Image: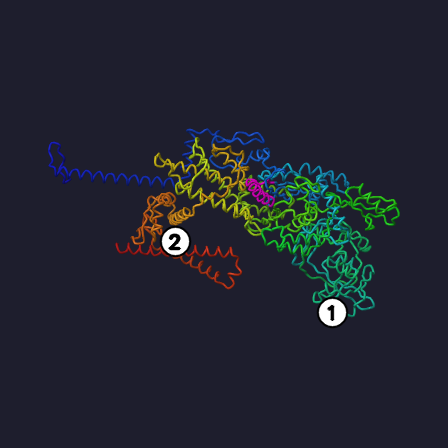
Amino acid sequence: MSGETPANPDVKLTEEELERKKKKEEKAKEKELKKLKAAQKAEAAKLKAQQGATSSKASKKKHERADAGEDNPEDYIDPQTPAGEKKKLSPKMAKEFLSDEVEKSWYAFWEKSGFFEADANSDKPSFTIVLPPPNVTGALHIGHALTAAIQDTIIRWRRMSGYNTLWVPGMDHAGIATQVVVEKKIMRERQLTRHDVGREKFVAEVWKWKEEHGGTILTQLRRLGASLDWSRECFTMDEKRSNAVTEAFVRLYKEKLIYRDLRLVNWDCVLRTAISDIEVDYIDIKEKTPLKVPGYKNLVEFGVLTSFAYPLEEGLGEIVVATTRVETMLGDTAIAVHPEDPRYKHLHGKFACHPFNGRKLPIVCDAILVDPKFGTGAVKITPAHDPNDFEVGKRHKLEFINIFTDDGKINSNGGSDFVGIPRFEARVAVTEALKSRGLYKGEEKNEMRLGVCSRTNDVVEPMIKPQWYVNCKSMGKEALDAVTDETNKKIDIIPKQYVAEWKRWLENIRDWCISRQLWWGHRVPAWYVTLEEDKLKELGAYENHWVVARNEKEAETEANRIFAGKKFQLAQDPDVLDTWFSSGLFPLSVLGWPDETQDLKTFYPTSVLETGHDILFFWVARMVMLGMKLGGDVPYTKVYLHPMIRDAHGRKMSKSLGNVVDPIEVIEGKELKELHKRLEEGNLDQSELKVAIEGQKKDFPKGIPKCGADALRFALVSYTAQSDKINLDIQRVYGYRQWCNKLWNAIRFAMSKLGDDYTPPSKIVPENLPFSCQWILSALNKAISKTISSLDAYEFSDASSAVYSWWQSQLCDIFIEVIKPYFFGDDASKTSAKRDAQDTLWVCLDNGLRLLHPFMPYVTEELWQRLPSPKHYTREESIMICKYPSVMESWTNENVEYEMDMVESAVKSLRSIRANLPADERNQRRAGFAVSRTDQIADLLKKHEMEVLTLANLSSLTVLTENDAAPTGCAVSVVNETLSVYLKLHGAIDVNKEREKLNTKLTELQKQRDTLNKAMSAKGYAEKVPARIQEENVAKLATLMQQLLSLEEAAEHFEREVAAKSSTS
């Protein structure tokens, strides 16, 4: 029972009693008010926790409720857009980013609007790139996608920066590759060879195939968003390019830079043509290895060194030699020994006798070729079938005997016992014949490199053939100097590491074989003159009977001049020119050379060549040589060499491994079973197919997710920092697809906060803006500066990182979050700040989308089109022709950036504490404390309390000095030497578990610190380690020291907490 007297309204209270009663009621009210506030706080915290734990579900339900009540699903669907017209956008933005919806329609609009086309008469500075012409046979592979992504990034940036940009598309006729494809086609469909069909009809078949299938890759480049000037599209065998090839050949011949000679070439017996060095792949063979060779039923053994003896004349016994190609002994014309080898001094000037044809083989002394310590010290010489022997043959004036037919069979020079036998069957037959004569001495395993044709897998045979050659000595020297002569440098190679390779190639350059025994390609513009009086009537029998001309009529005139008064017949050389010859002229021929066109005057030299480092010599150097000789100047002033793409494990992409990535499949997505189907429809044998399918299961267990063109482009560009190889991980590409969704949601947020009636500002004055607005503009300025300087230096990975970091870490993670309080409630005091936040947000999005556009053209175009248009000027039709952002000096504010860095650091430390809480407690709002060791930092945090509260999700922030008592019941993190932060904990702490966790972390960090310190103090570290790595190590060490400091203080605080609890218990 209460001790209080019940109130009686009839009883009158004294003045003193009334005063007491009044105070009592006030206290009760105050108590009730505190209870109410506490209940409200508790409810708010509970609600926040629930929202945090189920934020995505709650958000989804909220949207579903809104959809059910108000939204029309049709409002989120883009209307149909007629081809080539500006894309019609849905009234409302879709709830999430859908790449296939976003990426449709825009390209056709850009192309039809003429945005890609250059103007040869423009007074703008020109910027030109020639697309390395992909093979007409090809489909887009990931290397093409990398090339297109980098080049389109450059071109879109330059176009937006005020340049008259030209990016020329073209296709290469790809002589060997295309001929092989069509040969297989007519064999599959009609069981006919090209020889059955005949040259004229076969070439017509190739042209027909080209018209039907040759445009595949160009369509795919459009899908990737490549802004090529299609009005200038060309083909290496169209009329203009063919005229350029003929003109180049004639001019070089007249300057005695093209000549005809009998030399060794890489011969493909399946194609029956010489092939270039780049078309030869090498297999390293360690031991006796059976391999499948086209045209042979049985496997052929390689990696075997066969020894046999040649009988010596005059009864001097025999001399033993060894070879990995015993069949070539049929063409041997000498045996070489070292002049100082005492074993053979008595044989100098003597002869051996060929056991199968009686040919006398001189014993020659050659100190260049022969190593007396290797094998028997005697070497068989086959000048017509071995590069080293060819040189010996020239030095000693030996006979050159070709023993093979063009299709790889033994010819009559090989002897009647072997004629007509395929070369690798002859290998067995010759070995048996040597055994029967008692000359076989045995075999042993032998390491070797075996050259095979990349097109046919045929084993390359060195063959002596008459061919057309370009004398590269003087042109090679000019190309070398263009890169390496610092006093008159004309070309920069990026990365610089490839300058050494440029030097290696061009200092040792050999003359270039430019003729091929194919039917598809540019016919050699040379005619053979057969005189009526000639005894030998075969084509090419007399080397001085060739005339070079632009056409047959000109050839006839030239023949009449040389062979005046004589009767003759003309026959054009059946050979065609090496594909690299026509592609070497590409920067000239695409601009109209040899005619003096306006395009040539405006756009040559081009600005940059971007390609893979694997064709630095075969294409890049040859373009420089031909450009300087025929165009009068280098074809480009910069060469950017991108890395080669490997799979995520660093392996070369190969159909037989199942790791080949089709960029269209990355853009559109592909289920695993569809990936398997592509393999099954290929030409892998069953064992290879099994390996490939297993590889796909391992690398793409759920298939390839739909990533979209923008994400693929951005990933490829961001990968370019990886030295000379890119290990492509599809999950990283998909990560950028997710990032596109974040951009999408940033714009959705903006649209919801800007409102339908929002008008963007004509200008923005940073000093009048709230702190966070000043900061984001200053950060944007830095991102713009870094992006432009990185693009200018061809550091594409750094450029993409600068854009990504600003969007992700600064705009989305900080600015959008920190301005949200301005949009909550109807507080009149926030009206001005709200408008400032809106204006700043619009400026950021407008600049940010333009900054990002060269990397991600589709999503930026779509989002930019949705931004409210300024009223003080007429906006461009497309983002791609807008001005690229430039640095605004008035936006830079180092002091504001310093303050926000301090806020960010405090927030990160508070978040790191929160991350270690139990999962169900991480999203609860808690009290935070900051202990500052300086007044400056304390004042700074008090000044920016709202930003810390918002970003760290705190219920309150108390700023203390180091003289104040440390907060109890908290976890601690050291921000830096002047600041520590604390987060209030709830519930009991498992002392032993927490202590163990802290000690484990401390030990690990101390180990990392000691290892890094040891490396940095090692002898020669400052001289040998690149500056960039040294800078990274300093930053790593600083981070480790900070983490250690934080953990040590946390451990001390923890022990104090434990001690305090122990003393009170």
Q: Quadrant of the N terminus?
A: top left
Q: Which mark is residue 674?
A: none
| Secondary structure at numbered mark 1 | loop
Q: Name the outermost residue toward the front.
A: 123
Confirm whether residue 965 shows in the render. Answer: yes
Residue 481 location (% of width, % of height):
65, 54
Residue topped by disc 2:
976
Confirm whether residue 672 shows in the render. Answer: no
Residue 88 location (% of width, % of height):
53, 30
Residue topped by disc 1:
340
Identity, as a three-letter code, of the amino acid under mark 1: Glu
| Secondary structure at numbered mark 2 | strand
Categorize mark 1 by other alpha carbons within 10 Å: few (<14), some (14-19), many (20+).
Answer: few
Magenta span includes 630: no
Residue 378 location (% of width, % of height):
74, 65
Q: From the viewer's perspective, is 617 left or right of 991?
A: right
Q: Quadrant of the C terminus?
A: bottom left
Image: magenta residue range: 143-165
Q: Report the front residue among 331 and 83.
A: 83
In whole angstroms, how far apart are the C-alphas of marks 2 and 1?
76 Å
Q: Report the front residue among 894 and 841.
A: 894
Q: Report the front residue among 288 and 825.
A: 825
Identity, as a three-letter code, of the amino acid under mark 2: Asn
Residue 609 location (% of width, % of height):
62, 46
Q: Magenta part mainly helix, strand or loop?
A: helix
Magenta span includes 160: yes
The mark lying in front, picked from 2 and 1, is 2
1003 vs 698: above or below: below
Residue 1049 falls in which quadrant of the image? bottom left
Q: From the viewer's perspective, is 25 left or right of 406?
A: left
Residue 225 falls in which quadrant of the image? top right
873 vs 348: above or below: above
